C-alpha cells in the first residue's frame, strides 16, 4: 500500500515530497506545508486509494532537540483508509516564528475541533478555519501549554497558589 | 398580523445532571427547535498530556486511568501497547489473553454505566440500579486483580502489575453468568418499551457519510452502518485468535446505538468465555531486564534483579527517536496513543486520540433543527466521559 501512495504522490506532487520514513512498520510522508490541502483532496478523490478517514491531527515541539533544524514545530496528520485498512501519516514542519498552515476543515468537518485543540495547546494557526478559538484552556490563559518552553508547575489564573514569576523551564 | 421570529439563547450546564459531567452547551432556540448548539468544554482540563511528557515512560501510566475513568483498563492497554511498539518488545502469550479478557470486561463495565445513565436521562430510573448491580461484579474482578476498584493501573508496560488472583477464573465466570442474565433483563425493560422507542428512534440521526466526515468512531460510527472496528480491522494484543462479530446499525439513530452497545456486551461475553477457557500458562510479565521491572519476589532475593529494579525506578529506559501510533477499540471508540520518543528516558510527546472528544464534536450536527427535548438523548447516545474529553 505504501508503494501505491508513494507512486501516487511522486506522479502528481513530485516536488512536494521532502522525505519519507518508516518506523515500526508505520509509513510517514514529510511534505511541504503549502501542498497539504491539495494532497489530502487528491488522496480522498482517488478511486483506488480512497483515503476518506481523518483519524487525528496532532503536533510536536522539537525545541532543544537536534531535529529542530528542520523547523521547530511538526504537525502530524493521521490518515486511514477504511477499504484497505491502512494507516499512514503526513507530516509537515513549521518554523518557530508564527507557525501557520492551511486548515483541513474544507475537507473534513471533524478537523474543526482537532485543529482548535492544536491551536489552543501548541499555538499553530490554521488558515481558513471557521472558528479558531480556544477550546480546552481558560480564555485568560496566556501562552501555549504543550510548548516545551511553557513551565510545567506554574499556574496563571488568579486563584492559583503561585502568582509569582514562572520558574525556570526544566525539560 | 405579522409575527416576529425571535430566538432565545439557553445555557445548559455545566452543572446539569444529563450532561454526564461538566459539559456546557449554549443553545439557540426558536420555540422548541434548536437553531444552533455550541458545546463548551475544558472545565476538567488538567493537562494530562503535558504531565505524561514530563514523566518516565512507566510513571506516566497512572495518568491514563484518569482520562476515561469508566474504562481505565482500556486506557492502560492502549498506552502500554504504544510504548511496547515504540520499544519493539514482545510480550508473553498469557499476558495477551489476560489483557483481552480485562479489556472486554472493561467494555461491558463502560457500556453498563452507559445503559444505566442513558435510560435514567430518558426517565427509566430503575435501569440505573440494575446496570450498576451487574457493574459491581466486574469491579470485584478489578479489585481482586489490582487491589483497586477504579484506578487500577493493572496493565503495565511489558505485562501485568502482578500475578492473577487464584479465584480469577471463578470471579469472571460469575460475571459472565450475571451479565448474560442482566442483558436479558435490560432487553425486557427497554428494547420494546414504547416510551424508550419514542424517545430514541429517529432521534440524533447521523448518516454514514456524515459520520465519516466527522471522524466518528466506535458505536457512533457503526450505528450508521460503517464497518470499522479496530479489533477486526487492525487486530492488536491477540484479538485475531478470538471469534466474535461486529454489530452494525442501519439508521444511525440513538436507538440503533443502544442496540449495538447491547449486542457488543454479548459479543464481549463470548470473547471473555474464550479467554477463560483457553488461557495459556506462562509468566505474567516479559523477561526484559532494563525495560520491564523484574518480579517483586526476585528483587528481594536476587542481586541482579535488585540492580535492574533500582535502575528502572530511578532512570527508566531510553526510547529510540521515532513516533508510533497505536489504536485500540475502547468502549467509546478508537482510542489512540501517538508517542514520540526522542532518545531520552521521557517521551517528547504523548498525544491521546480521545474518542469522546472527537465524537462530541458532532453534537451540533445531531441536534440542530431538532427538538430541544432531544438534546438530552443526543448527548447521552454519544457516550461521553468528560475526563477524556478535557484530559
Image: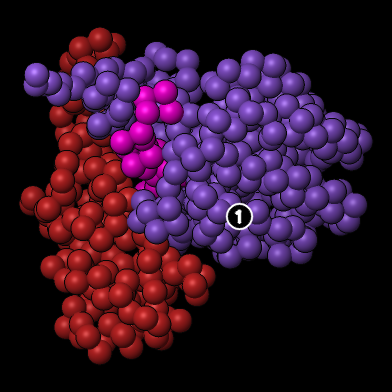
Mark 1 residue element: loop
Report the side of A55 relative to A70 (left or right). Answer: right
Q: On the image, numbered disc 1 is attached to which residue? A: B248
x, y percentage for residue B206? Answer: 42, 47
Report the side of A87 relative to B275 (left or right). Answer: left
Residue B146 appears in the picture as rendered: no
x, y percentage for residue B126? Answer: 69, 16
Residue occupying image coordinates x 22% and y 38%: A120
Report the side of B282 relative to A8 (left or right). Answer: right
Quarter of image, res B85: bottom right
**Chain part drawn in magenta:** B348-374
The C terminus of chain A appears in which quarter of the rendering? top left
Residue A25 or A47: which is nearer the viewer?
Answer: A47
Chain letter for the residue marked with disc 1 in the picture: B
x, y percentage for residue B326? Answer: 51, 57
Residue occupying image coordinates x 80% and y 50%: B270
Q: Which chain is red?
A: A
x, y percentage for residue B216? Answer: 44, 50
Does the segment drawn in magenta span residue A18? no
Residue B87, relative to residue B336: is it above or below?
below
| Colour chain B appears in | purple
Amino acid at each position: 500500500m505504501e508503494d501505491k501512495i508513494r507512486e501516487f504522490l511522486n506522479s502528481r506532487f513530485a516536488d512536494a515530497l521532502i522525505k519519507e520514513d518508516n518506523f515500526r512498520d508505520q509509513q510517514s510522508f514529510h511534505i511541504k506545508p503549502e501542498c497539504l490541502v491539495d494532497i489530502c483532496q487528491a488522496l480522498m478523490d482517488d478511486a483506488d486509494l480512497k483515503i476518506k478517514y481523518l483519524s487525528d491531527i496532532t503536533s510536536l515541539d522539537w525545541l532543544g532537540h537536534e531535529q529542530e533544524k528542520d523547523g521547530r514545530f511538526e504537525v502530524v496528520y493521521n490518515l486511514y483508509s477504511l477499504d484497505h485498512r491502512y494507516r499512514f501519516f503526513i507530516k509537515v514542519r513549521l518554523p518557530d516564528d508564527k507557525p501557520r498552515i492551511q486548515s483541513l476543515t474544507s475537507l473534513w468537518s471533524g478537523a474543526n475541533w482537532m485543529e482548535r485543540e492544536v491551536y489552543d495547546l501548541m499555538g499553530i494557526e490554521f488558515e481558513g478555519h471557521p472558528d479558531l478559538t480556544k477550546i480546552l484552556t481558560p480564555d485568560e490563559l496566556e501562552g501555549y501549554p504543550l510548548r516545551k518552553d511553557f513551565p510545567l508547575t506554574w499556574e496563571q489564573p488568579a486563584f492559583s497558589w503561585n502568582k509569582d514569576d514562572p520558574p525556570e523551564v526544566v525539560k | 398580523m405579522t409575527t416576529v421570529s425571535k430566538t432565545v439563547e439557553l445555557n445548559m450546564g455545566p452543572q446539569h445532571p444529563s450532561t454526564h459531567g461538566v459539559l456546557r452547551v449554549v443553545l439557540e432556540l426558536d420555540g422548541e427547535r434548536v437553531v444552533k448548539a455550541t458545546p463548551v468544554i475544558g472545565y476538567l482540563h488538567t493537562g494530562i498530556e503535558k504531565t505524561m511528557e514530563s514523566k518516565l515512560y512507566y510513571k506516566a501510566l497512572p495518568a491514563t486511568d484518569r482520562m476515561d475513568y469508566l474504562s481505565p483498563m482500556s486506557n492502560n492497554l492502549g498506552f502500554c501497547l504504544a510504548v511496547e511498539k515504540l520499544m519493539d518488545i514482545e510480550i508473553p502469550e498469557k499476558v495477551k489473553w489476560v489483557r483481552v479478557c480485562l479489556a472486554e470486561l472493561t467494555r461491558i463495565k463502560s457500556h453498563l454505566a452507559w445503559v444505566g445513565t442513558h435510560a435514567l436521562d430518558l426517565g427509566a430510573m430503575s435501569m440505573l440500579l440494575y446496570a450498576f448491580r451487574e457493574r459491581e461484579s466486574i469491579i470485584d474482578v478489578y479489585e481482586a486483580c489490582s487491589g483497586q476498584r477504579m484506578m487500577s493501573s493493572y496493565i503495565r508496560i511489558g505485562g501485568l502489575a502482578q500475578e492473577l488472583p487464584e479465584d480469577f477464573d471463578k470471579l469472571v465466570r460469575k460475571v459472565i453468568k450475571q451479565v448474560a442474565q442482566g442483558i436479558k433483563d435490560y432487553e425486557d425493560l427497554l428494547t420494546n418499551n414504547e416510551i424508550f422507542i419514542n424517545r430514541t428512534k429517529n432521534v440524533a440521526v447521523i448518516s454514514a457519510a456524515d459520520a465519516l466526515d466527522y471522524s466518528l468512531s466506535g458505536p457512533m460510527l457503526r450505528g450508521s452502518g460503517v464497518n470499522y472496528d479496530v479489533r477486526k480491522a487492525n487486530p492488536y494484543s491477540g484479538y485475531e485468535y478470538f471469534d466474535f462479530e461486529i454489530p452494525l446499525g442501519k439508521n444511525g439513530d440513538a436507538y440503533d446505538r443502544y442496540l449495538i452497545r447491547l449486542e457488543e456486551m454479548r459479543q464481549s461475553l463470548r470473547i471473555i468465555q474464550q479467554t477463560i477457557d483457553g488461557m495459556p500458562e506462562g509468566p505474567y510479565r516479559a523477561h526484559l531486564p532494563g525495560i520491564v521491572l523484574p518480579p517483586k519476589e526476585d528483587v528481594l532475593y536476587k542481586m541482579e534483579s535488585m540492580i535492574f529494579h533500582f535502575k528502572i525506578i530511578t532512570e527508566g529506559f531510553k526510547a529510540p527517536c521515532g513516533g508510533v501510533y497505536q489504536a485500540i477499540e475502547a468502549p467509546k471508540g478508537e482510542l489512540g496513543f501517538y508517542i514520540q520518543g526522542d532518545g531520552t528516558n521521557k517521551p517528547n510527546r504523548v498525544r491521546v486520540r480521545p474518542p469522546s472528544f472527537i465524537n462530541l464534536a458532532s453534537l451540533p450536527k445531531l441536534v440542530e433543527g431538532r427538538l430541544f427535548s432531544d438534546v438530552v438523548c443526543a448527548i447521552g447516545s454519544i457516550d461521553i466521559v468528560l475526563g477524556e474529553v478535557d484530559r
